[in-house]
Image: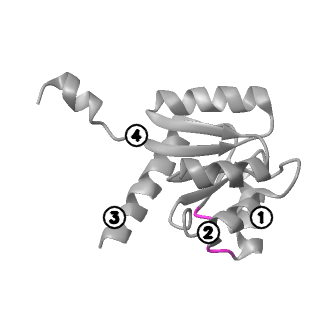
């Protein structure tokens, strides 16, 4: 197989970014695409739920504060739907690490796989991808 053919066969991970701040959504999506992720952006909870049913994301990176519903509500809805129940679901927030840990403890939810502080960095992308790989490996075992 030639290198060009191998590149054409490369499978890209689908990521749904749920972010209502347009400039931040554009910048974050661009950064995620540089990490070879297939990114689609939704600007509200309702848009995220609609988009997820056709895009079928493997990873969802969802802002906690959206104009129409909580990011946690979006995550719970995605986790309960057969088409998205196995996706890696992450809350992404401007909260501090301490506040995110407190939220994680307060929610007592298995629906959320990761809580990540903004802004996105390569380290956070690597955490997302490692958690996704671990989930896929666990599902295939």
Q: Nearer the viewer, mark 3 or mark 1?
A: 1
Between disc 4 and disc 3, whose residue precedes?
4
- Quarter occupied by the C terminus: bottom left
Q: Nearer the viewer, mark 4 or mark 3?
A: 4
Residue 133 location (% of width, % of height): 39, 56
Residue at 54%, 63% (x, y): give it. Answer: 83
Mark 1 surroundings within 10 Å by alpha-carbon count, few (fewer than 14), some (14 through 19), many (20 or more): few
- Residue at disc 4, secondary structure: loop
Residue at 75%, 72% (x, y): give it. Answer: 107
| Disc 4: which residue | 12
Label pair 3/1, CB-CB below 8 angstroms: no
Magenta region, mostly helix, strand or loop? loop
Report the Cα–Cα distance between label 3 and label 1: 27 Å
| Disc 3: which residue | 137
Between disc 3 and disc 1, whose residue precedes?
1
| Disc 2: which residue | 81
Q: Which residues are magenta?
A: 109-113
- Residue at disc 2, secondary structure: loop
Residue at 76%, 26% (x, y): give it. Answer: 23
Nearer to me, 108 or 139: 139
Between disc 2 and disc 3, whose residue precedes?
2
């Amino acid at each position: 197989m030639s290198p060009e053919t191998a590149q054409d066969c490369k499978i890209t991970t689908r990521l749904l970014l749920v972010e209502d701040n347009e400039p931040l959504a554009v910048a974050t999506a661009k950064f995620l695409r540089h990490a070879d992720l297939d990114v689609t952006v939704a600007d509200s909870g309702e848009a995220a739920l609609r988009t997820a049913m056709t895009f079928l994301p493997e990873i969802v990176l969802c802002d906690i504060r959206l104009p129409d519903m909580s990011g946690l509500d979006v995550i719970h809805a995605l986790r309960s739907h057969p088409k998205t129940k196995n996706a890696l679901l992450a809350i992404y927030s401007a909260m501090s690490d301490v506040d995110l840990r407190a939220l994680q403890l307060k929610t007592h939810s298995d629906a959320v796989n990761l809580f990540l502080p903004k802004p996105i960095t390569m380290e956070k992308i690597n955490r997302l991808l490692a958690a996704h790989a671990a989930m896929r490996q666990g599902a295939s075992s």
